[in-house]
Amino acid sequence: MNDVSCPSCAGTNPSDSAFCGKCGAPLAAQLSGAPAGSSSPGGQQSVANQPPPPNPYPPPQNVYLPPVPGTKVLGNNTKWALGLGIASVFCCGPVTGVIGIFLAKKDMDEIAAGRAPQLDESMAKVAFYLNIIASALAVVGLCLFWGMAAMRRF
């Protein structure tokens, strides 16, 4: 098996490689089989139809790629607000509900100001209203509980 030398970095690569494993440059050995009409005026082969070189390294940990244009993501405050709203409904009452209201409102304000257009506004609103409803239900439940306890005394 013959190795091919990279024209950019002089690294050695297997003969069946389309791109250099060291620098990612296209290898001339693979381009020699290209059609005759694909060469540029300077005598160099055109690489417009070649696939991009593969990324030899995995992305670093805890680094998130930017979202695809047109898609929406949940903000961290919205995620916390949804969790706090669910906790407020089932066990924690208005304590977590009020915190969830502030967190959801913070994401809603960022979206409205244009500082976070990638965030999903509808889910931020769901979290906001979920926390309001959960807090109101908790307050009503506490009032009924205390009212029933007061009525038992008489």
Image: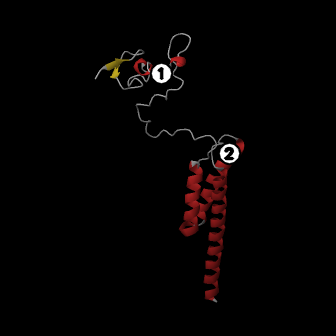
Secondary structure under the numbered disc 1 in the rendered image: loop
The amino acid type found where label 1 is placed reads Ala
**Is residue 147 found left or right of 2 in the rendered image?**
right
Residue 86, image x, y percentages? 56, 63
1 vs 2, front mark: 1
**Is residue 83 found left or right of 122 in the rendered image?**
left
Residue located 54% across and 68% down the image: 91
Colour pattern of the rendering:
secondary structure
> Is 57 in front, or is 111?
57
How far apart marks 1 and 2 lie (CA) works out to 50 Å
Residue located 59% across and 41% down the image: 68
Where the N terminus falls, by quadrant? Answer: top left
Q: Is residue 63 above or below residue 89?
A: above
> Is 78 in front, or is 29?
29
Residue 111, labelled with which disc? 2
| Quarter of the image where one finds residue 54 | top left
Residue located 70% across and 41% down the image: 114
Residue 24, image x, y percentages? 43, 24
Q: Is residue 76 above or below residue 133?
A: above
| Quarter of the image where one finds residue 138 | bottom right
Residue located 66% across and 50% down the image: 121
First-in-chain label (1 vs 2): 1
Residue, disc 1 = 34
